Image (cartoon, coloured by chain):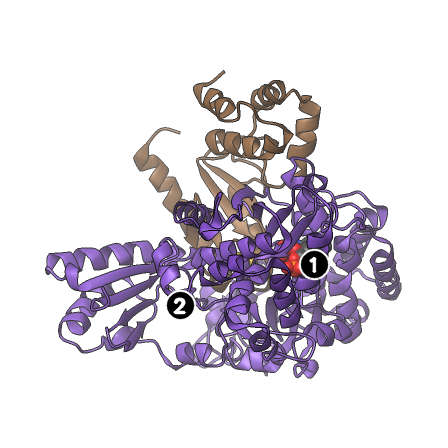
Amino acid sequence: MSEKRKILICMGTSGIAAGATGVARLFEQELGKRNLADGFQIIRTGDRGLFRDVLVDVIEPDGQRTTYEYVKAEDVVPIVEEHLIEGNPYAKRLAGKSYHDFFKSQMRIVLKNCGEIDPEDIEAYVMHDGYSALRKAVQDDSAQIVKTVTDSGLRGRGGAGFLTGMKWKFCREAAGDQKYIVCNADEGDPGAFMDRSVLEGDPHAVIEGMAIAGFAVGASRGVVYCRAEYPLAVKRLQKAIDQSREKGFLGKSVCGSPFEFDISIMQGAGAFVCGEETALLASIEGKRGTPRIKPPFPAQQGLWGKPTVINNVETFANVPHIINHGAEWFASIGTEKSKGTKVFALAGKVKNTGLVEVPMGTTIRELVFGPGGGMLHKKLGLKGVQLGGPSGGCIPAAMADTPIDYESLQSTGAIMGSGGVIIMDEKTCMVDVARYFTGFTVSESCGQCTPCRVGLKRMHEVLTRVVEGEGVPADLEFLGNMGNTICSTSLCGLGQTAPNPVLTTLRYFRDEFDAHVHRRECPAHVCTTLMHYEVIEDMCIKCGACAKVCPAGAVTWERGKTARIDPAKCTRCNACNTACKYMAIR
Amino acid sequence: MSRAMDSILKKYRRAGIDSLIPMLQDVQAEQGYLSKDAVAEIGRHLKVPASKIYGVATFYNQFRFEKLGRYHIQICRGTACHVKGSATLQKVLEQQLGVKAGQTTRDGLFSLEVVACIGACGLAPVISVNGEFHASVKQEEVGKILDVYRRRAESEGGV
Ligand SMILES: Cc1cc2nc3c(=O)[nH]c(=O)nc-3n(C[C@H](O)[C@H](O)[C@H](O)COP(=O)(O)O)c2cc1C
Ligand code: FES
């Protein structure tokens, strides 16, 4: 089999969205037509983490690798004829420098297999060292496994950053005839997708991590709670579970040992708060997903009242590597208190959007200008970075040298959170973003406690007023006070962190609030009620982009002349402003 | 009772309350929404009052109580899509369809739903129609996209 040349096609959610299924089928057809099918192995992988429409790799038996990006149906025949037959790479779609730069500055541990192996084939996982950690673990002393994980310094990747080994220890020591392992794959942050990619690209790693956890704490049942919006992840995970049961990695006798462990999947039903661990457990039990006060912690009283370890997808995916390579190896990566790597979902106004895995302690600037490839539009500079989604905060460009680790981020008012990173340029309005997140948490509040249910709603109303140009100076003070009150009085983590986006924006982007309130202006030209729809002469580069998109014929423009907007015809649809990359419309 | 409903209840023959959410998901996958009859049926099956089932079902965003359109449009309002202008996109969609998010057009052709991050942030802003993704959608393209489905409905006939 190793003599075959390999063709790798990225088929995660976004690859499929860009047409990868058809491209893969065409490769099969075209190779078949030319009687070449036997010489090639077509491997359908998960996403590699970079959005380049359809990505195709050709790997020679000696390991030499050629990558194509943005592959369309019509490129398949030339790739087959020019490259596969004649041996000359097809220049038109060869991956460029930015593709290679994207991967150069990363350190891939969790994402090692994503985009490299066929996630629906357990053999491929096994060939890449898969299940060797589990095999090793079940021969070992379970207390030793807990110790290794503790010594490695692995902290939860779901947001709070609690020491994973400690959590396991508590659960191991808790009394109970039945214990559970729960994998949190709810990934509620509306700008994050690392857990999805891991489940789609390397589901066996999560299964292996859960089984090792089960052995370590003495649990025989595992549940993966996965977002319903991730149908492909659920499908692949289910397939992987079935395969590993068949191969004896799950079931009555894991790897031939007396240890019994099995996993089932529960699909969430779309509620952000169900990512909170106690709400998640309530949801598995078939109830409304409302959190409860801790303690007791799930490690003592979790699912059905039994001791339960609940960890994030990425946390589990790290475990096999720690068992295989040892605690010391893992602890040598990262910073003093934050060990290992972290996967980030990079999105927003940056050139390369996608998943990047870097050692803890990498700075925000390195992230944006390394794998991120810099800002999306040449003319629009970095204004800030939002980390941690609705519970996180906005850090200004001036603080871009902050290292990304749990403590440093916390001290800025943001959090590591799940790993969603949204890059914002000068054409992103910070007040609008703060309002956006508040709107999100208002609709996702479970409604149990008053500060969160009513307080956030009041904040959202005030922010709406500010964004629409009807804010008054007292509003800003109100937002600060109310935000702090909600943080300190809410029942669960949702309310306790929900004001963060507003509080950090108030702290670092006060001038933007002031502009909205005092001058009735949106410096980023985003808040449409504050727009005048006139062209700023000095900024206009006379490209005509605005005239082309105006549906009302309100923009007049001639080559080499500044555009002009006729207020009588303008319908304030904002199309021109969206099209303008130069902030020339105000 | 419909045959589909029958087979779902069979699948969960000895089920307890922890099967409620999976059952609701199965019913919705089958019928597109949760009808009053279906909820009552599940209540009888699990021996739980319908009010309790509504209590659970309304808590979660996934469940719908209105029929879906023939083409179900999901507009992503995740963060990446938001900073790339999905708010305007939603407004334009609502205008052109004449319905608000969560509703179905009177001709039954389109229903509109707001979702948070469908995991294709690199393609932002994204809309998905019956699972087909449309990437980097500009507001002036919305009409064209809707027309594609209108024509498809016409050529396939019957609503
Ligand atoms: C509102 C809220 C939402 C959360 N969402 C998630 C989530 O989507 N995924 C996740 O892994 N953890 C989430 N968490 C954190 C979990 O409660 C829990 O701390 C985590 O799953 C523990 O796993 P870890 O130790 O591996 O991080 C959320 C917490 C809160 C308060
Ligand atoms: S934010 Fe829209 S796909 Fe992620």
Residue at the spot 29% in from the left edge and 76% down from the top edge: A65
Q: Colour of chain A?
A: purple
Chain coloured brown in this rendering? B
Q: Inspect this view and state whether residue A409 appears.
A: yes
Q: Amino acid at mark 2?
A: Arg
Q: Which element type, helix, strand or loop, lies under badge 2?
A: loop
- The answer to whether the residue bearing label 2 lies less than 8 angstroms from the nearest atom of ligand 2 is no
Residue at the spot 65% in from the left edge and 66% down from the top edge: A147
Taking the image as four quarters, which one is ligand 2 found in? bottom right
Which numbered marker is on residue A169? 1
Q: Quadrant of residue A35?
A: bottom left
Where residue B106 appears, x then y in whole percent?
A: 51, 31
> Comparing marks 2 and 1, which lies closer to the viewer?
1
Closer-to-camera residue (A547/A399): A399
Separation of disc 2 and disc 1 at Cα? 43 Å
Residue at the spot 70% in from the left edge and 72% down from the top edge: A406
Where residue A482 appears, x then y in whole percent?
A: 86, 58
Q: Amino acid at mark 1?
A: Lys
The residue under label 2 is: A52
Q: Which element type, helix, strand or loop, lies under badge 1?
A: helix
